Amino acid sequence: MSANNATQSLGTDNIGRLLFQYSLPAIIATAASAIYNIVDRIFIGQGVGPYAISGLALTLPLMNIFAAFGAMIGVGASTMVSIYMGQKNEEDAVRTLGNAFILNIILSIVTSFFGYMFLDDILMLFGASEMTLPYAREFMEIALIGNLLIHVYLGLNHIMRASGFPQKSMYVTLTTIAINITLAPIYIFVFHWGIRGAALATLCGQIVGTIIVMHHFLHHDKPLHFAPGCFRLKGKIVTNIFLIGLPNFIMLLCASLIAALMNRSLHNYGGDFAIGAFGIINSLLNLIAMIVAGFNQGMQPIAGFNFGARQLDRVKQVFKLTLVCGSTVTILGFLSGELFPRFISSMFTTDTELIELSAQGMRIALASFAIVGIQMVTSNFFQSVGRPKIAIVLTMTRQLLFLIPSMFLLPRIGGLGLTGVWLSMPVSDALAAIATICVLIYFVKVKKIFTNYEYKLK
């Protein structure tokens, strides 16, 4: 089957088969990426020390800021490509590809510049101490070099998946991860390059990934490829990319803010090791979230294409199926964290104090995680059908409206301290899920999103 026929099959093939076909490569790729991050933390924890784990956790907010810009372009562009292909508008699909490439280059250069200029100040703001700052700085100095590569690689990989090449997208991701996992232990344990070695291994993988995706879109035998004139920025396309990608940008930017505030609160109530415990807990949360994101990535081209083709029954089918799959994954994540917290924590470190802190925090933090899938899938669905404002609102409810106030209030209630910081996570998860269900009911019952053909892309 040609790539063009594969794209058109989004409007005709069985929904379950399509979701499996498009989700499985994305799940393998995203889960493998999360597993790499876990393995990376294990290498750092076992080969460098517990303070290095805390230092790595401090880099998360800054890395999320960089990822936020890349995700905004990649997700926004890939959604528009899916919708344009559903409308058989190949010209604007190609222009979207070229515009996304240029935007990624511009934003990566700007963010790298400011990152280098204020690196130590940012890390101290995010909760670094004299013990953890050197580790965080060493990692980020290498990561900033690869910022341009990661923007281009991730952005084009999103578009590759949405344009009918989900398996190739998966293979590219797996290749970069294989390089990372192969080189990281060599750089850490053989060359003794410490946390800098882990960052260098990641950079090597990004170089290879960028070369592969660029090669793909330079070939004119592909239905979507770089063409003369596609790099000229067009106002309508740039606006749509930013608007549709904005929920992902806000989500990751909020995640950065939350991680920074969480690190500061944890440091105030539990010290450097509490930050390290959060890094360990976040490894599990990230793995589960990435699997759900894989289902969301599989849903995105199917929902976007059929929405563009005005086949709303198929849009409803893929949403319901993705909701079931995503919720199943978060339920399994909840059970893992509640039943095996010490086993999971001991994988990262042999330090008994850090293991105990991580296990205690994990049980509390994941108390409402079973219902997080509802919020993740629903917000991504609205984004996939070109309704970014709704997705933004749903994203902000958990991150800003519920989590930040909980993080400040709960530690001060009854002297809860560190326990209150951990409690802020399940409280915000539960409240966000309730808000999401209310919004979904409104748009299904009142706006009739699955039956009203006038519910158009804005």
Image (spheres, rainbow, N blue to C red):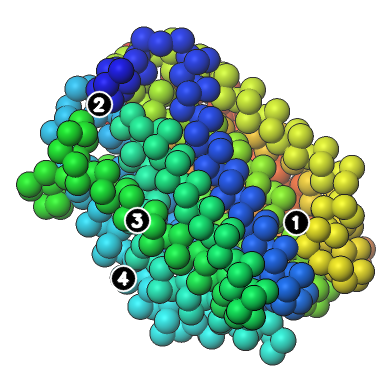
Residue underneath mark 2: 85
Give neighbour class at mark 3: few <14, some 14-19, many 20+ (Cα, 10 Å).
many
- Front disc: 3 or 1: 3
Residue underneath mark 3: 210
Q: What whole-number distance in Å separates the C-alpha atoms at marks 2 and 4?
A: 31 Å
Q: Quadrant of the N terminus?
A: top left
Left or right of 50? Residue 80 is: left
CB atoms at circles 3 and 4 under 8 Å apart?
A: no
58 vs 414: above or below: below
> As shown in the figure, which amino acid type bears the numbered disc 4?
Ile
Marks 2 and 3, how far apart at CA? 24 Å
Q: Which of label 3 and label 4 is nearer to you?
A: 3
The mark lying in front, picked from 2 and 3, is: 3
Q: Using the numbered discs, state the Cα–Cα distance from disc 1 to disc 2 in whole angstroms.
A: 40 Å
Q: Earlier in the sequence, mark 1 or mark 4?
A: 4
Report crowding for label 1: few under 14, some 14 to 19, many 20 or more residues within 10 A (C-alpha). Answer: many
**Residue toward you, 363 or 350:** 350
Residue under pointer 4: 109
Q: Amino acid at mark 2?
A: Met
Q: Position of residue 390 (x, y in %)?
A: 46, 37
Asked which secondary structure carries label 3, the reply is helix
- Residue topped by disc 1: 281
Determine the residue positioned at 69% across, 33% down: 329
At x 46%, y 67%, the residue is: 203
Name the disc covering residue 38, or none: none
